[in-house]
Amino acid sequence: MIVSEQHKFVFVEIPHTGSHSVSNELTGLYGGKAIVRKHANITQYMAWAKGEQKGYFKFATVRNPLDYMATMYEKYRSNHKGQYTNEKALLKNGGHVTGEHLKHFDYVHNQGGSFEGFMKTFFDKVYNNWFLVGSHQFDYVMKFENLQSEFAHVLGLIGVEKVRDIPHINPTKGKRPFEEYYTESLKDLVLRNYGPFMKKWGYEFPLGWQASEIPSACDLRFRLKDTLVDRTASLVKLDPDSPMVSRCKKLVDAVI
């Protein structure tokens, strides 16, 4: 998470959405400094902030979840930057790698699990990005797919002149166009579980999927979950990596 007292903004880093590149720009060129921890969310910022800091311009990034999942899979497959075998990167040692991450890593990297198996084993449930909890508190959410133009737009909103385009500094090894990862047998799972999130954030399905409709029951489940989490985020701090919140996430996923 990056904050600038000079320009009165806070940037919330959402994993796998270009946030590393944006953060480097903000700290290197626009007076930003890192606070709390890298992938803290807006509820953690609001608990940290005092006085006028709560009213700073708040922004983040979002990514098409179909592309997001393919990126996650390839990061596990390549052990991106060695993070999943680095003891210092573990949550218990102050890092960001959780027990769930290690389960996914073992399945993909050690067992050679396919993308289809990865999705069906771990992600056959209504999708919502828990790092975007409390999204109603953001002043702007940039789309990863339009990052250069939307970052320039955000700089204009906060009254800062753009210095340069954002360099891409954290590429995912082996990543292909995300459409190539989704077999016919995955389309129903994706439609049910990822369609509602895509609808909320204005994402379309790839060509050939356009005739499909999101089942109304799935859309309702997503809206219930999203509203519940969003309202809760207005009242308490929700750290997605804390053991208690992790257990609550599993309970919500099981019930809704």
Image (cartoon, rainbow, N blue to C red):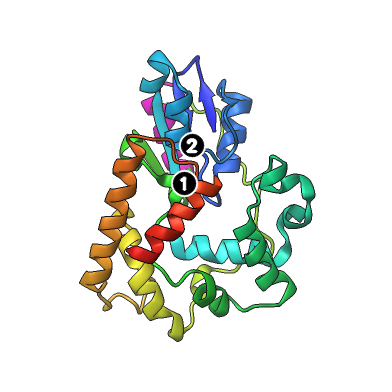
Helix or strand or loop: what does disc 2 sit on? loop
Magenta-highlighted stretch: main secondary structure? helix
Q: What amino acid type should be assigned to the residue bearing mark 1?
A: Phe
Q: Secondary structure at mark 1?
A: helix
**Quarter of the image containing the N terminus?**
top right
Q: Examine the rendering and report whether any part of residue 202 can be seen.
A: yes
User: How many numbered marks does the figure carry?
Assistant: 2
Residue under the image location 53 percent in, 38 percent down: 40
In the rendered image, the residue lying farthest to the bottom is: 185
The image shows residue 49 at horizontal and vertical percentages of 45, 21
Q: Is residue 140 above or below residue 251?
A: above
- Give how far across and how far down residue 226 sits, in percent: 31, 52
Q: Which residues are magenta?
A: 148-161
- Is 156 within the magenta? yes
Residue at the spot 29% in from the left edge and 42% down from the top edge = 231
Residue sitting at x 33%, y 67%: 195
Numbered disc in front, either 1 or 2: 1
Name the N-terminal-most of marks 1 and 2.
2
Number of residues whose C-alpha sits closer than 10 Å to that of mark 1, classed few (under 14), some (14–19) or many (20 or more): many
* Residue pointed to by mark 2: 12
Q: Which residue is mark 1?
A: 131
